[in-house]
Amino acid sequence: MAQLSDRLNRLSPSATLAMSQKSGEMKAQGIDVINLSVGEPDFNTPDHIKDAAKKAVDENYSRYSPVPGYVDLRKAIVDKLQKENNLEYSVNEVLVSNGAKQCVCNAVMALVNNGDEVIVPAPYWVSYPQMVKLAGGTPVYVNAGFDQNFKMTPQQLEAAITPKTKMLILCSPSNPTGSVYSRAELQGLADVIRKHDDLYVLADEIYEHINYVGKHESIAQFEGMKERCIIVNGVSKAYAMTGWRIGYMAAPEWIIKGCNKLQGQYTSVHAR
């Protein structure tokens, strides 16, 4: 009897895409519905970006690109991280992928082994635990409810850590709640993380500029955290470029090299 792999069988279909499909079906039936599933901005890609893309086509940027992305693009990301986040990275510490979603999956697949635990504050983006399961890891959920503005406390983090804990996935501004961790709140989490060797933070910052409550802060800014952090970001939300599929990560060079190796085997051929 034909059977799919165990790896695929333990993976659930994307709830986000299922919701989006349902929304499309309802709209086709004439039902007035607001689709909040896929995080699609309500404005279009700015004209100067579209003009630059047209120029790139005219200049024949249509051949195989370097696996980690063009050097000038990675330099631009390095500049962005320095100017907007006060974080110093080199070009070799940056990797460009097919959207931030692939960056998250790259990082999980590169660091998580069978049996490793990954802490996922809840509510959470539905793909996080599925990616952990795909890597053979175990998601450990930490419930952060309305009474704490959907943000995990340092005490909750400490209580969730075991000898098997390999990673914390931290999304700020949060998908799906919109909650934003303050500098002081991130400092508290960083103080806990530094006490545990070989514990890494995947900081999903894709909603950095969709922020209505204050300044975005990155957990990578604190002492000893840059070496523990994989920052994930991209252009989908801030610049309404969801269909362009451009995301990036910034991390220690050894992690970038691992993700580059992984990416080179399954998505090395695309225009970045």
Image (tube, grey):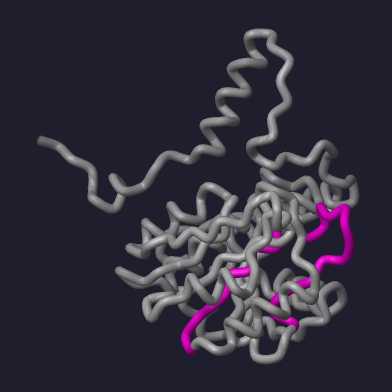
- Picture residue at 65% right of the left edge, 81% below the top: 190
- Which image quarter is the N terminus in? top left
In this rendering, position of residue 266 left or right of residue 126: left
> Residue at (51%, 87%) from the top-left corner?
196
Magenta-drawn stretch, dominant element (helix, strand or loop): loop
- The image position of residue 27, as x and y in percent, is 67, 16
Q: Is residue 61 left or right of residue 270?
A: right
Task: Give how far across and how far down residue 259 sits, in percent.
Answer: 49, 72
Q: Say whether residue 216 is left or right of residue 257.
A: right
Quadrant location of residue 182? Answer: bottom right
In depth, the one of 144 and 190 nearer the eye is: 144
Picture coordinates of residue 267 (x, y %)?
A: 48, 58
- Residue 13 at x, y = what percent? 42, 39
Vertical side of 79 occupied by 214: above or below = above
The total of numbered circles placed on residues is 0
Q: Residue furthest left?
A: 1
Residue 219 visible in the shown view: yes
In magenta segment, residue 255:
no
Residue shown at 69% from the left, 29% from the top: 35
The residue nearer to you, when weighing 41 against 95, is 41
Q: Is residue 49 left or right of residue 20?
A: right
Q: Is residue 72 visible?
A: no
| Furthest residue toward front | 147
Q: Is residue 3 above or below residue 152?
A: above
What is the magenta range? 197-221
**Going 65% across and 61% down the picture, which residue do you hit?**
171
Does residue 136 lie above or below 75 as drawn? above
